[in-house]
Amino acid sequence: MRDQPPRGLQKGRIVGRQKTYWDLESGIKSWRVHFRGKRESRFVAPAFVGLAVSTDHPVLASHLEAQRRLLVSSKANNVEELISQLDEAVAQATSGWRTLSEYANPDVVPEAILEAGRGLLLQAPCSVAQLVGAALERADVQFESLEVQHPSCEVRALILGRNFVVAEHFEFDAPHVV
């Protein structure tokens, strides 16, 4: 086993997924990639173009950066437009890998918080919270930003097209012919 993806495996299919490994195929070869300390995964589609193990990828911000909570304390004038701007801010901060809904208060939709003018809007990595906060400021919405959580361990991301796994460690089995 090795901790880096095999050379030549840049295009293929995810053909099996379990909690601790995914099976990959490319042409007539297949590989199994094991992960330890899995924190998160997202499966979008079986086919992928591009494969990398990264320590510096936008999906890792949620795991490597300190977290901030943004608490709103005044009403927004144009809630629909502001929600669009907040979504754009999150997309910009994460290079399109995350959405506002992933960081938003799970108990109350952002529209309700902005209409009421009070409540926890989101909890997000500092880089995301900073851009969302700037959008709130431009909309003259008062808010407070509180640091609440620091990262607890080092993780890496396995990126397969738009699919990913965030874990502490990855191991690739030697390829075998399908």
Image (spheres, grey):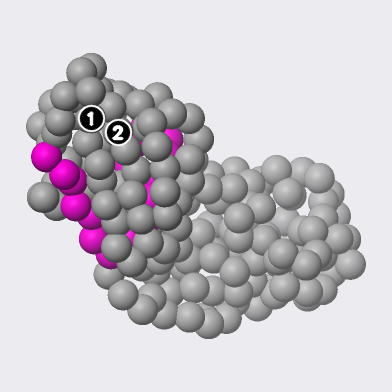
Residue 84 in view:
yes
> Does residue 160 show up magenta in the picture?
yes
Image location (x, y in percent) of residue 163: 42, 39
On the image, the x and y values in percent for residue 149 come to: 48, 80
Where is residue 96 drawn, in percent x and y? 49, 40
Disc 2 marks which residue?
24
Given residues 57 and 21, the one toward you in this image is 21
Q: Counting other residues with Cα less than 10 Å from the Cα at mark 1, is it few (<14), some (14-19), or many (20 or more)?
A: many
Q: Residue furthest top?
A: 27
- Compared with 110, 82 (above or below) is above
The picture quadrant where one finds residue 66 is bottom left
Contact flag, marks 2 and 1 (Cβ < 8 Å): yes
User: Within the image, what quadrant is residue 51 found in?
Assistant: top left
Q: Start and end of the magenta stretch?
A: 159-174
The answer to whether residue 70 is above or below residue 159 is below
Q: Amino acid at mark 2?
A: Leu
Q: Which residue is mark 1?
A: 30
Q: Position of residue 154 (x, y in %)?
A: 27, 69
Quarter of the image with the C terminus in it: top left
Q: Earlier in the sequence, mark 2 or mark 1?
A: 2
Q: Secondary structure at mark 1?
A: strand
